[in-house]
Amino acid sequence: MPFVVTGVISGATVFGASQYFDQDNSKEDYSYFTTASNKSAFASIGSAVADDFVKAAKTTVPAVVTIKNYQDRAQTMPDIDMFEFFFGPLGPNQQRQKQAPKNMPSGLGSGVIISPDGYIISNNHVVAGANKLEVVLSNKKTYIATLVGTDPNTDISLLKIEENGLPYLNFANSDLAEVGQWVLAVGNPLGLNSTVTAGIISAKGRSIDILSQQSRTPIESFIQTDAAINPGNSGGALVNVNGDLIGINTAIQSKTGYYEGYGFAVPSNLARKVVEDIKKFGLVQRGFLGVGSLDLSNALQVEAYNQKEKKNLKTGDGIYVTEVTEKSGAEDAGIKPGDIIIKIDNTYINGFSDLSFIIGSKRPGDKVAVTYIRNGKENTVNVTLKDLKGRTSTRSKEDLTVTEKIGAEFEPLSERVKTDYGLESGVIAKNVVEGSEMDKIGVVDNYIVMEINGKPVNTQKDVEKILNGYKGNVQVKYVDSYGRITTRGFKMP
């Protein structure tokens, strides 16, 4: 069965073993990977095009880097105790592992220098969970990078190294990229530095349902290419024959976990918007339309919806509105359930990936013209986008709540659970954000946080009271799914 992989090579991969994270989705397995391998296509390519490839490669290779992700996370698992009853048993594929050597990176990926003063764009999954990020240039110079920010919704991250006069790539307008045009993929697959492969753009606006693993509101509208992409190319460059950046290589679709013909890249227009937000505001500004949606171009979704809701909707282009969020921009503009959205501004909406990309590229407060069909009649309204909290203004890091800063939400433990497990305090961690401070110290969904900075916590308000305005090191005492009580710390963002 095919599965999608997005491209980090684990530390063990350099020595011959690969690391996957599988997910069952519509009878397909999905995991993590990205770009590489050599393609012997030049025999059929004209000399002029081959010369363009050479020029593009010379421009691109010096601006593509290797990113080494070092993590310090305890891996040893104790014997299962009564907490197994609460959290569930150890899965058949979850074997005990020894802690990796400190000098071995947990993962290897790629990145692209986008400014001469050391800003580097990559994937979120390349840097997730790192307590140290090392960047190696094509000339073998090595730097320790600062993680400026990440966006799990698009799988984009921004890093910074302290250097000037670096080679870098310019962003191209990915909206102008066309199916059939030649592209080069540049990265560091399988531990092989500075690898260049060639192919064409096979499709645009692809949604492969992979980012839902790390985000509740993913944006997927990938550029699909047949340029060879393999583990380790995540975060690398997809460029046109001028050497301009049109995408960040992110995933492949494969039965084996290695290249079999399909690669996917985040479009440069979306990636550029994300890094501009991170640089300017410290976090990504994202506007929402405020509708629940059904992709009418997806026959399986339409059939399932018809059966569940006793409807008789037909497949085709557009987005069927299933619900409208209260006090959202869509509600304010008069959009109602049953409307079919066919166009945003001047762009026709063929499916959900089109809607996701266009709205996801906007910020709270931006206005869009939404054209929809109601009772056979076409209507157009102006919608002011809002964030998930209903705000129309942009925000900075200083505006974030405590739980947003540390990357988790918390639910109270019932008194029965406290009694059953002999706990005097505790909250259950929920919606832990990959790469967040809580994730870095090993806290995942359903772990129990007992104390913060030595103080017991029983509600999310307790957590907020302790950390609101706090600037120092935070000590978190928590219980994992196997009954271990661990105390680990991080510096409050």
Image: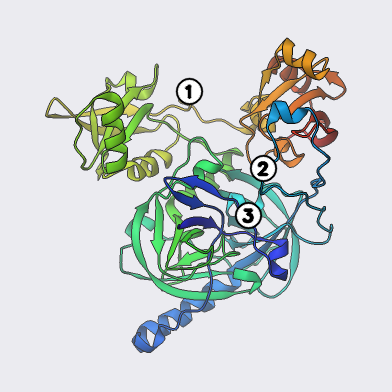
Q: Is residue 359 above or below residue 338?
A: below
Secondary element under disc 3, as helix, strand or loop, is helix
Of marks 2 and 3, the one in the foreground = 2
| Whether residue 51 is situated above or below residue 151 in the rendered picture | below
Left or right, 315 with reference to 478 = left
How far is mark 2 from mark 3, CA to CA?
25 Å
Three-letter residue code for mark 1? Arg
Q: Which mark is residue 126?
A: 3
* Nearest-to-viewer mark from 2 and 1: 2
Kindly indicate whether the residue at mark 1 contacts the one at mark 2 (C-beta within 8 angstroms). Answer: no
Mark 3, other Cα within 10 Å: few <14 / some 14–19 / many ≥20: many
The picture places residue 43, in percent across and down from the top left corner, at: 38, 89
Q: Nearer the viewer, residue 347 or 119?
A: 347
Name the disc covering residue 91, or none: 2
Question: Alpha-carbon distance for marks 2 and 1?
Answer: 42 Å
First in sequence: mark 2 or mark 3?
2
Please provide percent x and percent y for residue 289.
Answer: 37, 30
Residue 101 appears left or right of 338: right
Residue under the image location 38 percent in, 41 percent down: 356
- Residue 107 image point, x, y percent: 69, 58
Please say whether residue 422 is visible from this viewpoint: yes
For the point 53% across and 78% down, which residue is it? 58
Residue where numbered disc 1 is placed: 391
Amino acid carrying mark 3 in the image: Val
- Percent coordinates x, y for residue 459 in the rendering: 71, 15
- What amino acid type should be assigned to the residue bearing mark 2? Gly
Q: Residue furthest top?
A: 415
N-terminal label among 2 and 1: 2
Q: Secondary structure at mark 1?
A: loop
Q: Earlier in the sequence, mark 1 or mark 3?
A: 3
Closer mark to the observer between disc 1 and disc 3: 3
